[in-house]
Amino acid sequence: MNAPGTIRGGAHAAVGHDSAAAHVTGRALYVDDVPTVPGTLETALVLSPHAHARIRAIDLAGALAGPGVVAAVTAADIPGRNDIGPILAGEPLLAADAVTCVGQPVAAIAATSLDAARAAAQRVVVDYEPLPAILTLEEAIAGEHYVAPPQEMRRGDVAAALAAAPHRLAGEFRCGGQDHFYLEGQVALATPGEAGDIHVLSSTQHPTEVQHGIAHVLSLPFSAVTAEVRRMGGAFGGKESQATIIAAIAALLAWKARRPVKLRLPRDDDMQATGKRHPFLIRYDVGFDGDGRLHGLDLLLAANGGNVADHTPAVVTRALCHADNCYFIPALRFRGLACRTNTVSNTAFRGYGGPQGMFAIETILDTIARTLGLPLETVRARNYYGEGRDVTPYGMKVEDNLIGQVTGELDRAVDLSGWRTRIDAFNRTSPVIKKGLATIPVKFGISFNRPALNQAGALVNVYTDGSIALNHGGTEMGQGLFVKVAQVVAEVFQVDIDTIRLTATSTGKVPNTSPTAASSGSDLNGMAAFAAASEIRTRMTAVAAAHFGASQDEIVFAANRVYAGNRSLAFAELAALCWAERVSLSATGYYRTPKIHWDPATMSGRPFYYFVYAAAAAEVAIDTLTGESRILRAELIEDAGRSLNPAIDRGQIEGAFVQGAGWLTMEELWWDAEGRLRTHGPSTYKIPGSRDVPPVFNTRFLDTPNREATIFRSKAVGEPPLMLAIAVWLAIRDAIASVADHRLVPHLDAPATPERVLLAIDDLRARAAR
Ligand code: MTE
Ligand code: MOS
């Protein structure tokens, strides 16, 4: 065979995001950019001003009388079921008899202009009877107010292990929530069609759930509803279930008005009406020996679920499945509470409880290490999973352990002990600015905890000019899923990636899809697209073999051509030939993740196909007079298997780290005594900016193929690196501890805002003086 050359953009190629130029030039079409037809209505929502109140009456007359107002809806207008609960039932789209949080949608107005809709929304009169509200996790725990039953994992006799342990510590600490702060807010454009059909463009990670939500609300068969999304301007979990609220209200108004309706939330409404990352309250009782080896851990993870369940039960499960992080704990009881409060229902957010679980165990280990006066890395290493200590609290064997590799390679690359010496030297001569250094190992399970969600479909069409249209169930939110799946198809056909056209995700093309979440987008959809493309390639191979009079195993796809020895056809010529021979050039592909199973009753099984490993070291500086902190340097290593696209993956790793650092250091959600969120815009809610990116920021890959047969032996990358930011949290604790010569354990909750850092320093100084 002659040397055929290579293709552009196959598997493992570091090609850029398909829409990178369109993103930065404004040419990328988001839902709000799609031209609307004349007659399209704009929407405003009426949101609850009360954390908890009975609705006595809703008077729409004044609103409907206003100029340009076409339709108004309340719960009473819903022809089907007023329920869009994604996991459990009982989650009204529009409040019916009562409101249970501030910001809950009560009514919606469609008008000929946005101004007219907003003015009309102001004129809706709701008669509320305020009721007592539960606003804190403590109240919810004390009163056993839950959105779902408590969950528990157990191993051995934890009480006996704690009683017999040479050392024992107990305590309580917490981490805050986090707004997704996607740049594109929640938005939907619903268009009524023929015979009651509804088509909706939705900024959703989960088109199938939008389809189901609308069908339930309007009492339609699923087949009558089509949900479509080309891309989102960021989602981060915030558009998994929350998008359904927006899309279903738009669809309800479109159904009522018989006209297209667009609903786009202003940022302040978006932040008040939609859920966030769960704040957690953590209580622990831990037993260990003088070497820092864990003997037993009794751990309580209480998540603030808000007013309804939404994703909370599953977030709690994932938190419990990550509270071990990289450590074998011989005796344990992990309890998870899905607490109900009268605040907006919290939801999926990058890591999905995993970050909170890992934050818990890492803060506990840091406390143990400081109490014993041992380096944290030493304590960790004594507790790592290893030979004979390799079963997780949920009964899954850790078969692919790379903890030693990632932490070892990081140490070799950055020389931790030299780095530590420089920090200590700096602190000795710097009375006001103090530096801290810390590391973190991460083990994150890949697959949805619920096995049924681990499936995907794809549709590949080859046209007779050789161009290829690719469609699959995954959604694009900036993470680079579309380009990765296109690389898979380019690899199968051995054609340049620009041959492949990426098309909008639609429930009408690939049905019954899972959300693009749990970092599994490329694992699942990459495999489904591989199956579809391989099927077509097999058919094309047969046509080529007949054409050349060769056997099928002599046919080689390479560099945009198809070869039999020295003879060849352009890929496009073979496509045209297939049509002439009446061979189908369209195929669907399907994939289901093997090996996984989960028993929710016993909280055990093999929920994850494999683990992703990562490690980081971060150096911070704090100002002991103002409490301000900065990340000075971050060194990351990520196990992305054989990365499908190292350029995309690098962006995911860096972005996730900075997003995680925002969660743990500066992003503070603040509710007042009436349960009103007072940080509902960028003026009061501080997310990391470009100057918060560490000035020294290095990312490395552990270039090891996945031992499981994932797509081209790659690994998922979307969520795990967020947890690397726990190194920043621990480094701030380290800097604070330096104020008392590392002899005491700082008391600190996350986020480590300047206020909290100052309070922790004051407290430490007071304790040191005693
Ligand atoms: N990256 C960007 N740019 N925007 C996003 O919204 N979401 C994250 C992550 N990376 C997100 C992102 C979350 S929460 C998940 S679960 C994954 O992407 C989902 O995509 P994947 O499964 O294709 O990795
Ligand atoms: Mo990501 S929180 O699983 O959408």
Image: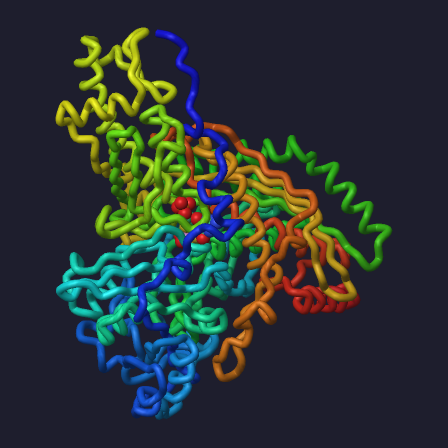
How does the figure colour the protein chain or chains?
A: rainbow
Residue placed most toward the observer, 313 or 158 = 313
User: What residue lies at 15% left-to-right and 27% top-to-bottom?
Assistant: 583
User: What percent of the width, then of the height, locates residue 270?
Assistant: 45, 69
Looking at the rendered image, the quarter that the N terminus falls into is: top left
Residue placed most toward the observer, 685 or 20 = 20
User: What residue lies at 13% left-to-right and 64% top-to-bottom?
Assistant: 195
In this view, 3 is above or below 75: above
Residue placed most toward the observer, 591 or 404 = 591
Residue placed most toward the observer, 610 or 223 = 223
User: What residue lies at 22% left-to-right and 17% top-to-bottom?
Assistant: 544
Looking at the rendered image, the quarter that the C terminus falls into is: bottom right
Label count reads 0
User: What residue lies at 37% left-to-right and 56% top-to-bottom?
Assistant: 317
Q: Residue furthest front?
A: 38
In this view, 339 is above or below 74: above
Q: Is residue 329 visible?
A: no
User: What percent of the width, then of the height, locates residue 339?
Assistant: 40, 70
User: What percent of the width, then of the height, locates residue 58?
Assistant: 31, 89
Q: Is residue 563 visible?
A: yes
In this view, 350 is above or below 128: above
